[in-house]
Image (cartoon, rainbow, N blue to C red):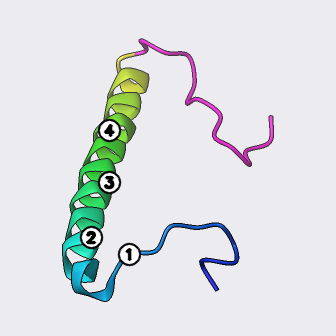
Amino acid sequence: MAVSAGEGVVPASELPTVRAKLQRVLGKKTVENEILKESVEYAAEKKWIARSPLLPGDSQ
């Protein structure tokens, strides 16, 4: 199915390595996201920014 969709295929023998790499990347991005959220909250408390930034899906 992946071949017909034009997507890359990972051999089953490499799956644990690829899965571990993806988990590390996801973990890193999750930490980065939490740091950014905390930074925005801190800046809002200090009145360094007027309001929280709009996120995708937020209405104005």
Task: Where is residue 15? Give x, y as percent.
Answer: 28, 81
Q: Are marks 1 and 4 in contact (CB under 8 Å)?
A: no
Mark in front: 1 vs 4 = 1
What residue did someone put label 1 on? Answer: 10
Q: Give the class, few, some or many, for how many residues have Cα within 10 Å of label 4's Cα (few <14, many ≥20).
A: few
**Residue 9 included in the magenta stretch of the image:** no
Mark 1 residue element: loop
Question: Helix, strand, or loop for circle 4?
Answer: helix
Name the residue type under label 1. Val
Label 1, label 4: how many angstroms apart (C-alpha)?
A: 37 Å
State the image quarter where residue 5 is shown: bottom right
> Of helix, strand and loop, which mostly describes the magenta segment?
loop
For label 4, the residue is 38
The mark that comes first in sequence, 4 or 2, is 2
Give the mark nearer the N terminus: 1 vs 4.
Answer: 1
Where is the N terminus found, in terms of image quarters? bottom right
Which residue is disc 2 drawn over?
Answer: 18
Q: CA distance from mark 4 to mark 2?
A: 30 Å
Q: Which residues are magenta?
A: 47-60
- The structure residue drawn at horizontal position 21% and vertical position 60%, both measured from the top left corner, is 24
| Residue designated by label 3 | 30
Amino acid type of the residue that numbered disc 4 sits on in the rendered structure: Glu
Closer to viewer: mark 3 or mark 4: 3
